[in-house]
Amino acid sequence: MRHLRWIPAVAGIWMAGTLLWAVAQQSQLERRAGVVTAREAYVAAPRQLVASPLVVEGHWSPDGRYLLVTSALVRWRRDPFEQPEVTGWVLTLWNSAQQRATQVAKGAPTEAPASVVWLARSNIALLTVIRPVARRTPSAESEEPVEREQVVVRLDAARGAVRTVGVFPEDVGMTFSPYAPVAVLEGAQQLWILRSDGSLSPPLNWGSEAIRRYRASQRRWTPDGRMLCWQELEQEQWMGLDLVTGTVGPVSEPPVRLERPELPQPPVSIRLVPQELRHEEIKESVKALWLEGERSKALICGDVDSAQLSPRGDAVFDVSQGAGFVAPLVRESREQYEEMRQAERRRVIMSNARQIGLAILMYVQDYDETFPPNSVDVQALLMPYLRNEMVFSFPGTNFVYLLNTNSMASIDRPAETMVGFIQAPGGRAVIWVDAHVTWESQ
């Protein structure tokens, strides 16, 4: 069959295109890795970059719709062993619905974000930043700040609005309501009320002794978020601070202590698994990020420093090599997931079969139009033409070769003569002499 000589001649071109297509299919299968629970499946979408190095920490909102990531801005030095120079910091907001990251605040290198707190039942977050307000006269001993102040910033994540609430002494603390988006700022002699609309009350001058007793008391919030009550240790009388009017008065009965409502636990979890990588004599310890369901596990990333599952279980935030990433988790029915997995597996197996078929034709071209013998390791004979042993080692498959030193001229019907097949669960990919491939279900 001399007219078939053109097939091996162009097999190299076909091989390159098929190999690239196969890599894309293999990557797609890996990106679509997921886990199966009792009722459904969670599929991990490709990780998306949220914040560049160096990420300090991340905080999910209570409903998991938003993520706030604090990062340090650095200038890398020429000497890789020297610590990078910190040039500032940045706060990044990730919107899960829009799949978009936005920088919402920046600061100078002399400032340091102290905390990020999401207020209850809201998409409002408070950021506190510590910055110096005075320095000693420069001397050889020290130039450290002797006084610092605390800047409180309010972020409305839904609107993307950021504004400064106020500037307070460094030792001012905060008490947050577990039921409403309100807070009380507590200084050494004064209190401030941060209301749900973002307004700040004038300072309530209580004096240092009253503040000391207040801080040492047992405190409870009313479920409507209107009042903060406390019982002084030396008295049985309960007092209440009305957060709307700013007035203080006795309370006949203390508010009932309510348990903070908890979100339903997602049916998936994440786990960081330490592992050791080796290259010749070099060893490196890393942590792999796994998504775990009731009946299966899936690898999300092979090298992470930390990770957090969103409260709703629909995304994973991780820090890898100093950068922050989010991998959305798509919820599907088990039937859809299994059909998707089977279809993707079939595409990869068909691609592997095409590569093997083209490699066989290239072998035939080099060996006087004679097919490989069946008495030796056919895979080893084909490797110089494949340079990719993964086509033979895809999980759950097995390659079967059928010919044995047959000559191309002896085959009358190349499109109807089998070279071999890749056996897989549910069927097989059949390779024909003319290098086309078909799928046969079983």
Image (cartoon, rainbow, N blue to C red):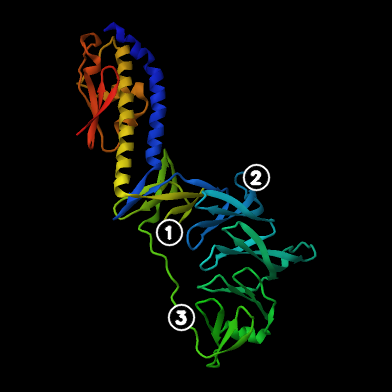
Q: Please report contact status of discs 3 and 2: CB closer than 8 Å, yes or no.
A: no
| Residue behind mark 3 | 257
Q: Label 1 neighbourhood size at 10 Å, few (<14), some (14-19), many (20+)? A: some
Alpha-carbon distance for marks 3 and 2?
54 Å
9 left or right of 411 in image: right
Alpha-carbon distance for marks 2 and 1?
41 Å
Quick one: 112 or 229, which is closer to the camera? 229
Q: Please report contact status of discs 2 and 1: CB closer than 8 Å, yes or no.
A: no
Q: Label 2 neighbourhood size at 10 Å, few (<14), some (14-19), many (20+)? A: few
323 left or right of 208 in image: left
Q: Amino acid at mark 1?
A: Arg
Q: Residue at x 55, y 93 (%)?
A: 235
Q: Residue 364 in the image: x percent, y percent? A: 29, 14
Q: Amino acid at mark 3?
A: Arg
Q: Which mark is residue 312?
A: 1
Q: Residue at x 31, y 29 (%)?
A: 350
| Residue behind mark 2 | 77
> Between disc 3 and disc 2, whose residue precedes?
2
Residue 205's place in the image compared with 368, above or below, is below
Q: Residue at x 77, y 66 (%)?
A: 136
Residue 433's place in the image compared with 348, above or below, is above
Q: Label 3 neighbourhood size at 10 Å, few (<14), some (14-19), many (20+)? A: few
Q: Quadrant of the N terminus?
A: top left
* Disc number lying in front (2 or 1): 1
